[in-house]
Amino acid sequence: MLAVTFRQLEVFKNIVETGTFSAAASRLNISQPSVSMHIRALEIHLQQPVFFRHHGRAPILTDIGRRVYDHAEDLLSQSQKALADIDALTAVKENVLSFSAHRFIGNHLLSKPLASFAQNNPGIEIIANIVSLDQAIEKIRQRGVDLGLFLANGEMQGITSEVIGHQQLVFIASSDHPLASQNNLFYQSLTKHPFIGPIKSTEYGKLLHSIFKKAGFTETNTTTQSQNTLIRKELILSGVGFSCALKSGWINELNSGKIVVLDVVDKPLSLEVRMGLLPDRKISKASHQFMHYLENLKAQGVFDS
């Protein structure tokens, strides 16, 4: 047996309120035969008529018709409220800027520009997710944010993005490491020493590996893998091995003289800084405004090193 539909109840309710089948059809912008079809389907389900019909006179509710009308009002009112609530949940909040960013970008490239943006746009609510590269990308793909800022080596599958900067990768070691005093180093000479890198299965680990492979450097002697920068820093300072890092993230350590950039003369390495979003994502006005702001910063070279 067919179930009663909301459309049948809507048509039925409009007949009661307008007084005729033709008036209900006009209000709903459908044909009168379509109105009759919905009422016939409703009555088949109930196995009783909902109207007394007399030729030339307005339809009159039967007892079951009156009871259906009482329930129809409640059900349709509840459904309209539910739909309104769903619309509110999915509606774009135009004054909200939501983005995810890799920790390196958030900590070393974006903190001051974001503070300036917030200061100049006091009416914008900012939700900044500063996370790992894996999480930054996942946030975009799961529609948890409007935009994402991430490190890359080319397009990211399923994400529309543009390059807004390039960050230099350098090989680093403690100042008393055997490699620190050597000049004109090639990748081949580096592979003889223990390498400290990120976990290879992570997005950042895969990204570095792809860069290394393209340049011809092989991490044949990786002794330690960690996503934690502080752990890698302590391992480097203790002389356990050398590493490869984004130079902008190690300025304080390099200025202290305790960690140095190795004199590698092979092909220089760098990573792209990209701004991206899902191609079908409808983003807020605030997020659009932030995108234009980032494009202006790109023209100024803010994200380059």
Image (tube, rainbow, N blue to C red):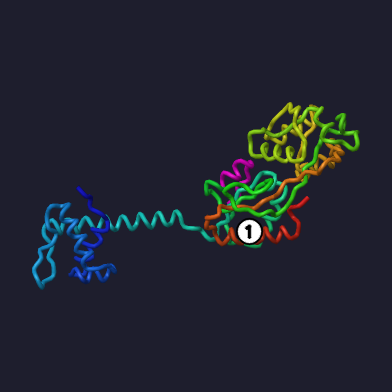
Please state which amino acid type lies under the numbered disc 1. Met
Q: Which residues are magenta?
A: 127-139
Most foreground residue, 94 or 171: 171
- Can I make out residue 219 in this image? yes
Most foreground residue, 70 or 105: 105
114 sits to left or right of 262: left
Give the image quarter of residue 83: bottom left
Residue 57 vs 294, above or below: the answer is below
Check if residue 133 falls in the magenta segment: yes
255 sits to left or right of 235: right
Give the image quarter of residue 268: top right
Q: Residue at x 63, y 59 (%)?
A: 291
**Residue 290 x/y as whole percent:** 63, 59
Residue 4 vs 30, above or below: the answer is above
Give the image quarter of residue 221: top right
- Can I make out residue 106 in this image? no
Q: Residue at x 73, y 60 (%)?
A: 299
**Residue 168 x/y as whole percent:** 78, 46
